[in-house]
Image: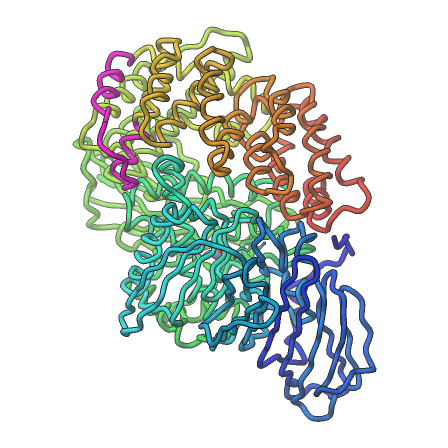
Amino acid sequence: MRTDTGHVFRLEDYRPSDYLIRETALSFDLEPENTIVEARLSIKRREGAEHSVPLILDGDELTLISLHINDVPATDYDVTPELLTIRSLPYNADFTLTIVTSINPTTNRQLMGLYRSSNIYTTQCEAEGFRRITYFLDRPDVLSIYTVRLEADKAAAPVLLSNGNLQQSGALDNSRHFAIWHDPHPKPSYLFALVAGSLGSISDIFTTGSGRVVALNIYVEHGNESRALYAMDALKRSMAWDEDVYGCVYDLDIFNIVAVSDFNMGAMENKGLNIFNDKYVLADPQTATDADYAGIEAVIAHEYFHNWTGNRITCRDWFQLCLKEGLTVYRDHEFSSDQRSRAVHRIDEVKLLKSQQFPEDGGPLAHPVRPKEYREINNFYTATVYEKGSELIRMLRTIVGDDVYYQALKLYFTRHDGQAVTIEDFIKSFEDVSGQSLARFALWYDQAGTPVVTARSQYDEQNRSLQIILEQKLAPTPGQSEKQPVHIPVQFGLIGADGKDIPITAHQGAGLQGDILHLQESTQSWTFFDINEKPVLSLLRGFSAPVHLEQQLSHEEQVFLARFDRDAFGRWQALNHLLTTEILKNVDELHQQKPVQFDPQLLQLLAETAQDETLDHAFRALCLSLPDEADIARVMGTNIDPDLIHQSRETLLAAIAQANAAGFTKIYEQLHDTAPFTPDAASAGKRALKAVLLNYLTIAENSPAQAYALYEQANNMTDRFAALTLLVHRFSGHPDTVKALAQFESDYQSIPLVMDKWFAVQARRPSEHALETVEALINHKLFSFDNPNRCRSLLGSFAAGNPTGFNRADGKAYVFFSTLILQIDRENPQLASRLLTSLRSWRTLEPVRRAHLQSALERIAASPNLSTDVRDISERMLA
Ligand code: B3K
Ligand code: ZN
């Protein structure tokens, strides 16, 4: 492991490299513990660079075996595992460098570079893993054409894959064989990939609009082939969608996907050879939930869409990461919205943004969508870069309109194809097509923090006019005390007493376009005329900008919006606000040991929503689900006692359950379905509603009977796991629960992705004894620190998904967790630092817990030999 050097990389220091690598010929002699890599690089000195300037190549834990320049042994160079500095290079600007290194894929537990997982050789190079394979200019602006020869034992590795198209393959002596792959598209090293091993596969074809017949293959562990069919279907739909909507056509004869079980993240978009965490490939009704299916569809699309947004046009440097990630997330959200219910998907996107990105933006790890500096780039694959980055694209589209949006992207694709570019280049395409300056908008990329938009409105009965005043503020964030106003598109509607939108005919105030108020200054106001009645204001429809909206709406107005807003997001938002307010009010009352009371209007509203058959099931499920405990904590912001939040939320759940038991039972029974499982959104919506109602029913009855019945009858994992969750979280220790947990374990012990659920559900059980459970599960025969999915399912679920259990007041879970972070850091720094970020909101806790958590964090920060990843996160969290 590389330990921290303290070096800080800064955007302002960017310089093009003095040398280019035009062609890269790699040859791998694959052996589990000693793989020999020969890299033959066609180097070109950049025009204007002095011939005396040394060539400095990146490495990481490499062993150099030999080095030749133009086939002559090199003499004037320095080498360490991290750096190869070559001097006395030929006068001629073009020369060939041949580097031979040896690496050990078996002991590579960082899962970066070339590693072996379940006997499969696989790679992960983004961001800086290629330098763990050979010395290279491992930076995204060095684009090269790759030819890759793989050689391995034929029985151990019958499948040999790399990027691009297969050129040649054949048998060799000593029961070995080889394959040669060529990728005609110049690419940065982070997109290089190889896979070798014994794998099963499924195949299909896709014919592009330009008539190219593309062979599609998904490789999985033997026996899992049928579980890859949904991923294949999602891939074909993604390919068709990207052609139809963006005109992006696939550009190779083969598209391969490989699923591996040890992977640090979701998946990787290597050119023509996407490598996936098997969690985002494998599904069948018996092992995957609806959420798993939706996740597979989204990630398959996301990686495929990178072929244009990321691979054909890539990032000049890692500060520009959002250039490919924000845009690609936006594209995958749009794809999923087209495949499913757009309104429901938007609510899910916003829930994710608020739960993951808002706390990041509001805490010690806040950074701009395009950071200005980093110590470890792997710590910047964040919700801010991805999810807020996607929101910026969404806003940009709102600002310029659909036509300009698609034209500008077309221009961006043609203008920059084959280049490594910046956010400025991207914005320029939009400015050129729209003829409009986007300077105010572009500030979003450089300013961290979530703007607060305060809205006031005044109705003048006499003049029949309505004035709306919007104000924006952005609080200081680490390293940024001064902020400027940004361009915030606020979609809105004025709703009349009949529940219909009042048409806007006359107004005063700059920056109104259709139903969008373009807020660009600190404060702006608009006056609307011919408004015959005092309307209810629906602001930020569709969550048109990633901001905190502060608005003085009365309780009645919120209820009105929850009933009548024609914007489904607006309805959900109003209801969510009412529920949050109710829980917060009761937190105060519980804190003061006062009796808790409930708003009868709210209970009535929930009953109506549950029964409203004009609404789709998934939407009803979202409306009836109370905000999570973490959502409540985020809104509270300070002095958080997770036990009080839990109690308050539970009390409201019980009140809703009791008030609606009969009505909910009726709907629940109607939803009973014996038809075979299908993963489509409509069926998934029914199951989601069923699960929410079942929660209320088990609370009302205070009995596990119905949950256990569903557990036993379920013909799919979604229902079965929903039932198991209720049993474990509400009836822990009950004989039914004990039986179900044991049954689940014995049924699925050989299916790791399902066992991840079994670990996670127990780690999330809200109880002060959850720590003891997690400690015991660490010693379970199926727990392994080597498998990131398993670590995340047990430790990540505990730290990020169990507010009461993890934050027990004696601080013992913090000590336990910090010890494990240090242990994991020695093997897999990326995993350790990612797990650690779940503690980023530690300062919002009440003083006793906060002090305990601070000591645990300080203990981490004070440990010697930390990875750069964990040192960076722990120091920023404490700063
Ligand atoms: N680009 C990869 C993420 C790489 C993470 C490196 N630490 C997956 C994706 O965003 O599509
Ligand atoms: Zn991505």
Is residue 682 found inside the magenta-colored segment of the image? yes
The x, y position of residue 311, in whole percent, is 47, 67
* Residue visible at 20% across and 22% down in the picture: 670
Q: Is residue 605 visible?
A: yes
Is residue 172 found inside the magenta-colored segment of the image? no
The one nearer the camera, 176 or 566, is 176
Corner quadrant of residue 10: bottom right
The one nearer the camera, 329 or 577, is 329
* Residue visible at 63% across and 35% down in the picture: 839
In the drawing, does residue 91 fall left or right of residue 778?
right
The x, y position of residue 449, in whole percent, is 55, 46
The x, y position of residue 740, in whole percent, is 44, 19
Q: Is residue 520 visible?
A: no
Indicate the quadrant containing the C terminus: top left, top right, bottom left or bottom right.
top right
The x, y position of residue 476, in whole percent, is 61, 46
**Which portion, as a residue range, is magenta?**
660-689
In this view, 98 is above or below 381: below
Give the dominant element type of the magenta stretch: helix, strand or loop: helix
* Residue visible at 55% across and 66% down in the picture: 192
In the drawing, does residue 649 fall left or right of residue 866?
left
In this view, 72 is above or below 720: below
In the drawing, does residue 501 fall left or right of residue 18?
left
In the drawing, does residue 311 fall left or right of residue 865?
left
In this view, 595 is above or below 291: above
Corner quadrant of residue 152: bottom right
* Residue visible at 50% across and 73% down in the picture: 170
